[in-house]
Image (cartoon, coloured by chain):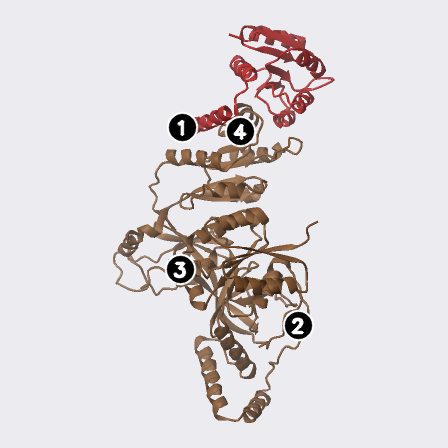
Amino acid sequence: MNKGNLVIVDDEPTLVKLLAKKLKEYADNIFTAANGEEALVVLAKQKIHCVICDVSMPKMDGIQLIKKMRSDNNPVPFVFYTGVGNHEMMLEVAKYGAFDFFNKPDFTGLEEVIVRGLKEGFNRPSETGSELDFVSEYQKLLNEMK
Amino acid sequence: MDTAMHLAYLGSDSDFYKELSSYVSNYGVGEFELKEATYQKGSLVELISNCRPQIVYIDLTLIIEVGDLLNEVLYLKRNTALKSILFVAIFPDQLSLDANRTLLTTGFQLFFIKGSETISLFRDSAYIAFDAISDFPTFSRARRINKNITMGSCATLYSIVDNDFILETDLDIPFDSINLKLPIFCDLTNSHFSIKERGNFIANYPMTTSFLMQLPLADAWSEVSTDFVLQDTVDTWKDFNKEMLVEGPVYIKVISKSKKIFHEIYQFYNPALFNISFIENVDIENLRNTLECKNPPLIFFEHDVEPETENFDQLSALIILLSSFSDYMPIVICTNTPSKTSAIQKLLNYKNIICFDKPLNGEIFSSLTKSFMEKRKKSDSTHFIFDVAATDRILDVKFDVELTSLTEHEITFYCSVPLPMFSLLHFNLPIEFIATVVPPIYELTNRAESNQYMAFINGIDEAGLALLRKFINQIIYNPPPDYSDAAIAQVVKSMNAVKKEDIATPPEQILLKKEEKIEQKNSEAFKETRFSGKSKL
């Protein structure tokens, strides 16, 4: 069964390597890009199902990248991460649709999020499906409430 | 650009509509557009959603059951964007108004009885809604009265909580007790009720203040007296009025700029289950107060459609506010939000938030609230809410004011407690009428300790108006020593005496006698000859 293709976008090569290693068994192919501009090239050439992206980068940052993707009507899921103190930037990317967020260096649960992200990118849920997901999320919250 | 001021007539009296319409189209000031529609359940909300009139004239001639209408007006008045709409109730006769006193506290601000001058209805409503003024006619004015009278400020009981009751009013009484006649427990003659708590309740009706009031309960050793009510009486009353009382509805807050969402949600609205209020923006101070008092378990937050105009600051501010409460963590349902729930939960560090990328609509609202009600725990609290159509909830808070002038159109008086604009008052001079507080149509002087207010007289039929007119003429020529019930009764007696005299004596002689009386008393009263402009308080 296809797992989907992932691109990791970050200007820190060490972190890109670490993430690629951590996630290799969860994706069919992992591509890398050092900034938003490079990522655009990858996204144009390859069929990408999920993007994992640093928010703050030179040349083209995560905000500009997701903004470009959404203006091109590309709904690919974006998982963002950033260092402490970039809350404002996180709020900005949230406007364009973030799949999930992580605060560096804590990537606990990243694998599970990427699996879900790839799945969603691979097979975008139908409108009814997304509404059902929403209602079931709500039911779960209700059940958890005292 | 559409510069017309929009009005709507909701009713089935085509003659009345035509008459109103002719005044609207020939009015000297501004451009008005009057739309006509008939009333059936839901049509008021639909009308407001479709054409946003600033004045709605609702003709109650053929509306027998007002419960649905009251719920609709109340629902609309809980929407901050619609609060300024003026609802005018039109009755076929005085009896009909008396039978529908529940309208007094639900958001109607002007009351009209057919047969009175329709131009006056339009002039007054246009003044209230648009500040549109051409010329008010000249009426006989009794002025420089400066005597104390007791007025009633229209108020409502909201609920009975254990052995206390919640009173909602526009009068923020600064004392420890309130003077009122309780419409329930009719044997109770005590008219002074102690305030147990003030300011901690958000009014459910369109009122500015609410109080938790103490029922004067007799203790086990008290002798039977009409000054107190027995615990058994309270319990029996609750038991007998079960059908009038409902368990507290769930308070729900909707924050959305959508112009239509209130109409969508109304299709699924059950007033017995929900109390829904709408706001367009997160105003932290107002919201803090509401959330603290009402603890809505569900808050719907709708983002703007375009990401460029999207503002997460509002959502962040809301979540920061919610996080500041120690034991209250409602579910926040974010619609039109492209990001996933887990992303926003982490971003805002708030667990009870869920996101949906589509706009809020009636079906989603219904589905989520229904699930909530299924999971809702049954409350053990004896918190009973008066039905909106229950006449037993309507009462007057009595308060003394200093009457300064009176015409058949307006009344002015000093009041030591601030009165919100457009609040409804009752006077009995000598006939009972409603008075709507308005910005004065001419300059009024204030005092350090009390402001002078003007209120438009309404809710009075032609016969009542004739009586009021006579009363004014009588007090112009023969001012009573005070305005106690006894003194007013004496004035009425004199009026009737004059009437008999009128029949027995030739008119020239009556005129002469009246002139003599004026000279004798050297009365300061005189007829107001012209109206001299207006200014706001």
Dot 1 falls on which chain? A
Which residue type does callout 4 highlight? Answer: Phe
Dot 3 falls on which chain? B
Q: In screen coordinates, is A138 left or right of B134? A: left
Residue B416 horizontal/vertical position (percent): 54, 64
In the rendered view, would you say B53 is above or below B356?
Answer: below
Q: Which mark is residue B531?
A: 2
Q: How far apart in space, not on screen, are marks 3 and 1 (Cα)?
A: 44 Å
Residue B216 horizontal/vertical position (percent): 34, 58
Q: Viewer-nearest of labels 3 and 1?
A: 1
Q: Which chain is red?
A: A
The residue that mark 3 highlights is B193
Q: Nearer the viewer, residue B452 or B236?
A: B236
The residue that mark 4 highlights is B356
The residue that mark 1 highlights is A143
Q: Which chain is brown?
A: B
In the rendered view, would you say B331 is above or below B276?
Answer: above
Q: Residue at x 63, y 16 (%)?
A: A53
Q: Earlier in the sequence, mark 3 or mark 2?
A: 3
